[in-house]
Each structure stands twice: as structure tokens, then as C-alpha cells.
Amino acid sequence: MSFGLFIRRRTTAAMASLLQNGLSSSSTSKILPCVTSSISFTEDPTTHAAVPQILDAATEENLQKAAAYLKQGRLVAFPTETVYGLGGSAMANSDAIPKIFATKGRPSDNPLIVHIASRSQLDALIDPEYKDTIPTCYTALMDKFWPGPLTLLFPTIPGQQVSEKVTCGLRTVGVRMPSHPVARALLAISNMPLAAPSANTSGRPSTTQASHVASDLAGKEEPACILDGGECTVGVESTVVTALPEGKSVNNKEVLRVLRLGGVSPEDLQTCIDDAGLSYEVEVKMEAYAPSAINPVNAGNGHGVKDDFIPSTPGMKYKHYSPDAKVLLLKVTNQTSALPLNSLLSAYQNKKVGILHLDESNLPKAVRKYTSKVASISMGREGRYDEQATRLFAGLRSLDENKVDVILVEVVKEEGLGRTVMERLRKSAGADNAKIEVQLPVSS
Ligand code: TXA
Ligand code: MG
């Protein structure tokens, strides 16, 4: 089976595949196609707001329909360049936020990211008391990476500026401006900031195609519709960062902390900051941090200071990205100490084996020597972390659809976006996330 079969750039292909997969007609009928290339933007000279120009009439009609649903307090699933989001109004008086948590089955302490169409919408989200203390690096980061896969934390007043259910009681709000034309057009037409987590059921691999959303949320009352803008190009979620003051410095520099790895690599963040002549050290610290008690932004952000192990990003502690099949992470090596492939496979006799491999890999051929019940999908070329990121979640989902019992995933190098790919893979493997070194039979 080739991965190409699963790439559905065109809406017609997505619909055909949905019907083939036997999804209910109610979930497929919610899919509203959008022709991404028909959407462009100009900037309003006075307000600096993004103004969409939509050439395809059906696309415009579908976006208007979706915006109307949002205004009624309903949810809309929409494509972003990272993953599909499940969006609803983020405003203080929003009825939509509990529906997002209920539809996804999301733990109630996991805050949502707020999406905006243009920087003109940002001011309304930031606590005015802290407007003058926004870290200097934020401007450089927004200039370079917005619109795009970067989320920044800002101080906010929950209940006044955004719904307190968006921030789950924290006094910070994660904001990003997506670059996908359908997402930006929806944000501009509805003229409201949208809270949107990834549109998967909580715990499942994220959704990078409209059909994934239809499949995960089939039979649910929400969303009212799913805008189909094709396959997400980045394929992994945004990088979440904060430089809000914590009274901490590294190497006498201020700290830009990566709370969740994502579509912008730590290396690219550091380059952006260095190019802007700023003195910040990018630190990847996702597991924990104890914010300073003295700084009001942190003291009031709900993380507390009592525990000595405090998740920096509430979502990081939950099960994530898990397909139905067991996931094992393999490093192919010719070290004699490594486990022979046939020993590994002996535990899966008469089971169906899925493989998520690199283009150049000999692993699929070697596995087929021992069993014929194999489905393999390539994540892309070695070193092409962009390709691997794009195909990762769709690959896991496709192998699940093929009813494999175990998915053997080839590990990639932990550099650039490869770090994000590996972080997602480790999470999808859950407790079995240790790398297993395997050696292939000599003739492979
Ligand atoms: O690319 C993305 O970010 C996608 C698309 C739809 O935009 N959204 C997304 O949302 O991945 P979600 O909810 O699946 O992940 C948001 C992550 C969670 O780990 C959450 O805990 C963290 O961001 N987060 C949100 N607000 C936060 C805050 N104020 N402080 C710390 N972490 C926050
Ligand atoms: Mg998610």
C-alpha cells in the first residue's frame, strides 16, 4: 500500500474515501468543500484587519454558512496549516466552549488556543495592565512566524477578554494566527477570535484531513459543519512558547521557553531572535516549571507554586496521539547487541503488522520475510522532517483503518522538526516509548 493512496488533496477524493470507509452519511454531509486557492487577502488600511477575497462562489457560501453557525454559538471544524481545529467563539460570553470540551472528551483543566485573523484582533485579548510588559522578543517572533504554526502566551483577564473556560482559570492565553486561507477567512468573516483545539477525539492522533474529523466525531451533535480545505501541510500542531517574566535567566539571557514542540523548531526560534539582535535563550522545557510566586502574571496563572513538579502546559500530562494499535519505536542498526527482527516479530505471530517507515528503509522488505500480513506506509525521506511531520498522523490513522495490531515506527533524528516528530511518536507509543534497537537479516 502506498502512502499516496491516502493523500486526498481534492475534496472529491476525500468524499469518495469517506464513503469507501463507510462513515455515516450524517458526518459526511457535514463536510463543506472549500477551494483554498480561490482565497486571498488584502489588509484594511485603517484597521489593519485581514480582508478575504474569495473567487469561488461555493467556497464563499460555505464560509458564510460556517460563520453563521459560529455566531449561533455552534462549533465548526476547520483546516489550519498544522491540523484541523474544532472551533467556537472564544469571547467572554461564549456558549461554545463547553461544547468543545464535551465533543472532544477533553479534560476540563486543559486550556484552549485562541486563533486570530490579524494582529488587529490581538489587543482585545491582552490584559491592558500588562500591555507594556509584553516581552520584546514577541514582536520579532510574530513578524517572522505569523501567520503560521507558533502560539505565544499573553496575559489576559479570563471572563472579561476571553471566556474563562478557554484558559481553564489561567491568567495567560495562548494565541496564534493560522496561515491556512480557510482558517483565516473564517476568522475574518465571523469577526471573532476562535478557540480551537485539534479536532480529534481526546487521546487520538490529531486530524490532518477533513475525513479524520468526520470519522472521530461521527454521530456527535457538534460540529455543525466541517470545512474541507484539503490536507494540512505542516501536519503537527503549533509550537507553544512563553517569555512572560518568571524571574529566570539562562547564561545571563532572558528565556523563551518552548512549552510544546511543534511546527516551528527551537533552532528556527533561536535564529529569529538572534537575527533581531535580542538576547534570549530558547529553552525546551515541556515537562515542568515552577513559576515565580512574586510575579503576578505567573502567581495568578493558576499553576500554583506548591508542587515541586508542575506541568507547564496542562495538556502535556495526558495520553495523546494514540492509535488503536500498539506502537513500537524501532531503531534499525547493525550492532550485534541489537534484537534480531525475527525475535521481535515472534511476539506478533498471526497478527497484522503495520510499518511507518522512511523512504529509504529496508524494514518493510525485511518484515515481509517473516510475515505476509503487513501494511506499510512511508513517512517520507530520511532527513526530510517536514515530510515526516506532514504524514505522521495520517499514517497512524491509515494503519488503524487497516486493522493492524502493532505499528512499527522507524525513529528519526532529534534535530529541527525531527524533535517534534519524535515527541509525537513517543506520546503515541505511550508506556512502550523506549527505542528498540533491531537488526535486520543480512540479506535485507
Ligand atoms: O496547531 C495547533 O496549535 C492546533 C490548531 C488547531 O491550531 N491546536 C492545538 O490545540 O493543538 P490543542 O488544544 O490540541 O493543544 C493546545 C496545547 C495544549 O497542550 C494546552 O495545554 C496548551 O496548548 N495551552 C493552551 N493554552 C495554554 C496556556 N494558557 N498556558 C499553557 N499551556 C496552554
Ligand atoms: Mg490536541
Image (cartoon, rainbow, N blue to C red):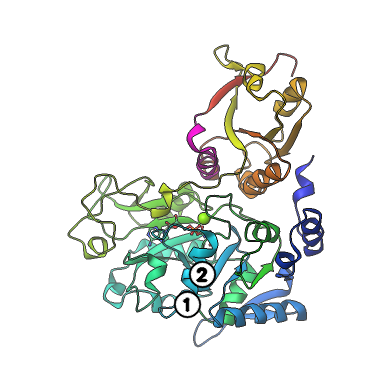
Q: Is residue 196 visible?
A: no
CA–CA distance in space, label 1 to label 2: 8 Å
Q: Could you tell me the amino acid type at mark 2?
A: Lys
Q: Nearer the viewer, residue 118 or 338?
A: 338
What kind of element bears circle 1? loop
User: Is 250 positioned to the left or the right of 5 in the image?
Assistant: left
How many neighbours does mark 2 have within 10 angstroms: few (below 14), some (14-19), or many (20 or more)? some
Give the residue at x 21% y 61%.
Answer: 295
| Vertical arrangement, residue 366 with respect to residue 327, above or below | above
Quadrant assignment for the N terminus:
top right
Give the residue at x 50% y 88%.
Answer: 46
Q: Could you tell me the amino acid type at mark 1?
A: Asp
What kind of element bears circle 2? helix
Question: Which residue occupies the extreme left position in the image?
Answer: 294
Q: Is residue 66 visible?
A: yes
For the magenta stretch, what is the residue range? 420-434
Q: Position of residue 172 (x, y in %)?
A: 34, 65
Q: Position of residue 383 (x, y in %)?
A: 62, 38
Q: Are marks 1 and 2 in contact (CB under 8 Å)?
A: yes
Q: Position of residue 59 (x, y in %)?
A: 73, 76
User: Is 55 positioned to the left or the right of 103 in the image?
Assistant: right
Q: Is residue 431 magenta?
A: yes
Question: Which residue occupies the extreme bottom position in the image?
Answer: 46
Q: Is residue 424 magenta?
A: yes
Return the mark for residue 99. Answer: 2
Return the mark for residue 95. Answer: 1
* Disc 2 residue: CB within 8 Å of ligand 1: no
